[in-house]
Each structure stands twice: as structure tokens, then as C-alpha cells.
């Protein structure tokens, strides 16, 4: 892997290319990310670059006149995290991810990674946590067919037979049933970058990208580009 960046989803829109063809695109706020740590073969057993994205307030603990603790920004970065970022010479960050770059040794602490590492026409893989749908039935969750809707059928939106009573006397693993839907990691491969705004750190990617608005998206150079 040579190119990767963290981004947040802004939303979807549409643009027109040179010949007037309409293209649906997802707008991503890609970076700027900063290098917070460099993993080396000698110290860590592998080469990687750790990057931080989006500033976050520090958690500060003060004491009043009676010695009672007063916490400021309770959900901020703790003392250990503050030391980690201070060592890199950068401000505290909300998101931290690692990328296994072959050229990890060429990076320096505090270096910025911006959207201009990508160009128009690049193929990328986008990973994110999908939208959570809550508890759903087998029809919505798995696309199963419903039963008859007439009176007396007693089988409308059930998932079907779970298993015979005598043989095999059990429910097979993988049986489609109601359950939690969404909120899982999803990766869409071979998306095309159709426009790059280097000044605003924006990437316009053709098609849909998983995850909600303002959600964290991991953008990597495609591992199996289609010809």
C-alpha cells in the first residue's frame, strides 16, 4: 500500500463531466491527517505509519480548595494519550489508525497527509461502519419471501421452518432468522475518484460510500483494480 487517508462523509451530490454525463458522487472531507507514530521493523516487527485525524480536546483534572477533583472535558483525551501526541509534536486527535506503508521510513513525525495524494481517475477502497438498522425481521434483514397474506394462513412474515422435530432434530447453523441489522464494517472496492479539491481537502468519489454522514471513512489505494 502506498496511499491511504482518513476522511469523513459530507454527503452525496451530482456533477457533470466534460461530455455532459451526470455522475452521482459522494463528497468526502479527506484529511488533513498527521503522522503520530512510525512503526519500524526493528522496534515493532513491521513497518507502518500511525495517523491522527480531527482535533479533540484534552481531559483536564483540577482540584478545588478542598482537594476534590474537578474534571474538565470528561470525554477528552486522557493523560496517556496526551503524552503520546505531545511526543509526536501534534495536537490531540479523535481518530487514530495505522496504515502498513512499504515506504513507512520516508515519513516523519508530525508530517501532514492531505487529499492531494490522490488524483482524478485513481481507484480506491472505502471502509466504514454501516448504518445501524436495529432489530429487524428476516424479510428486511435477509430479503426472504413472505408467506400468503390471506386469512387463516398464520404465516405472513415469519422466516420459515426452523427444522424438523425428529430429523435432524436441530436448527442448522446459518439459518436465516431475525436479528440485529447493520452497524458492521463494510468495504466497497474499486471506487473511482472523479475530482480532487486540494485547497479544501475534498474528494469526490463516484457512487455511494458506506456509513452515515459525518462518519469516519478509511480510504486506501485499491488492492485489486479492475481493468
Image (cartoon, rainbow, N blue to C red):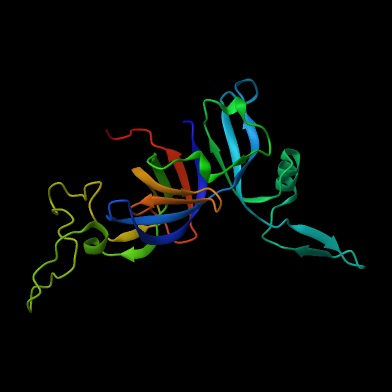
Quadrant in the rendering for residue 34: top right
Quick one: quadrant of the C terminus?
A: top left
* Residue at point 13%, 53% (across, down): 164
Answer with left or right where residue 148 lies relative to residue 63: left
Quadrant in the rendering for residue 66: bottom right
Q: Residue furthest right?
A: 65
Q: Residue furthest top?
A: 42
Across and down, in percent, residue 112 comes to 62, 41
Q: How many marks?
A: 0
Across and down, in percent, residue 81 comes to 70, 46
Q: Residue furthest bottom?
A: 151
Across and down, in percent, residue 198 comes to 53, 48
As drawn, 18 above or below 108: below
Residue 188 visible (yes or no): no
Q: Nearer the viewer, residue 158 or 139?
A: 139
Q: Nearer the viewer, residue 47 or 25?
A: 25
Across and down, in percent, residue 20 comes to 28, 56
Q: Nearer the viewer, residue 104 or 183?
A: 104
* Residue at point 65%, 38% (across, down): 111
Residue 49 visible (yes or no): yes
As drawn, 175 above or below 225: below
Answer with left or right where residue 171 lies relative to residue 114: left
As drawn, 210 above or below 145: above
Q: Residue furthest front?
A: 19
* Residue at point 17%, 49% (across, down): 169
* Residue at point 39%, 42% (across, down): 125
Amino acid at each position: 500500500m502506498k496511499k491511504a487517508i482518513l476522511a469523513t462523509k459530507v454527503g452525496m451530490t451530482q456533477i457533470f463531466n466534460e461530455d455532459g454525463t451526470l455522475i452521482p458522487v459522494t463528497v468526502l472531507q479527506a484529511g488533513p491527517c498527521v503522522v503520530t507514530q512510525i512503526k519500524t521493523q526493528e522496534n515493532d516487527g513491521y513497518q507502518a505509519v500511525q495517523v491522527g485525524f480531527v482535533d479533540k480536546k484534552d481531559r483536564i483534572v483540577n482540584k478545588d480548595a478542598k482537594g476534590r477533583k474537578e474534571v474538565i472535558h470528561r470525554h477528552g483525551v486522557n493523560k496517556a494519550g496526551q503524552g503520546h501526541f505531545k511526543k509526536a509534536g501534534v495536537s490531540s486527535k479523535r481518530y487514530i489508525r495505522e496504515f502498513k506503508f512499504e515506504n513507512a521510513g520516508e515519513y516523519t513525525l508530525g508530517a501532514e497527509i492531505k487529499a492531494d495524494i490522490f488524483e482524478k481517475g485513481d481507484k480506491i477502497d472505502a471502509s466504514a461502519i454501516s448504518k445501524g438498522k436495529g432489530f429487524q425481521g428476516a424479510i428486511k434483514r435477509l430479503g426472504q419471501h413472505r408467506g400468503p397474506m390471506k386469512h387463516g394462513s398464520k404465516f405472513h412474515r415469519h422466516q420459515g421452518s426452523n427444522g424438523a422435530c425428529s430429523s435432524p432434530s436441530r436448527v442448522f447453523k446459518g439459518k436465516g432468522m431475525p436479528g440485529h441489522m447493520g452497524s458492521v464494517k463494510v468495504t466497497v472496492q474499486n471506487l473511482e475518484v472523479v475530482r480532487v479539491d486540494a485547497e479544501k481537502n475534498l474528494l469526490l468519489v463516484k457512487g455511494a460510500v458506506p456509513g452515515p454522514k459525518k462518519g469516519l471513512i478509511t480510504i486506501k489505494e485499491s488492492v485489486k483494480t479492475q481493468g
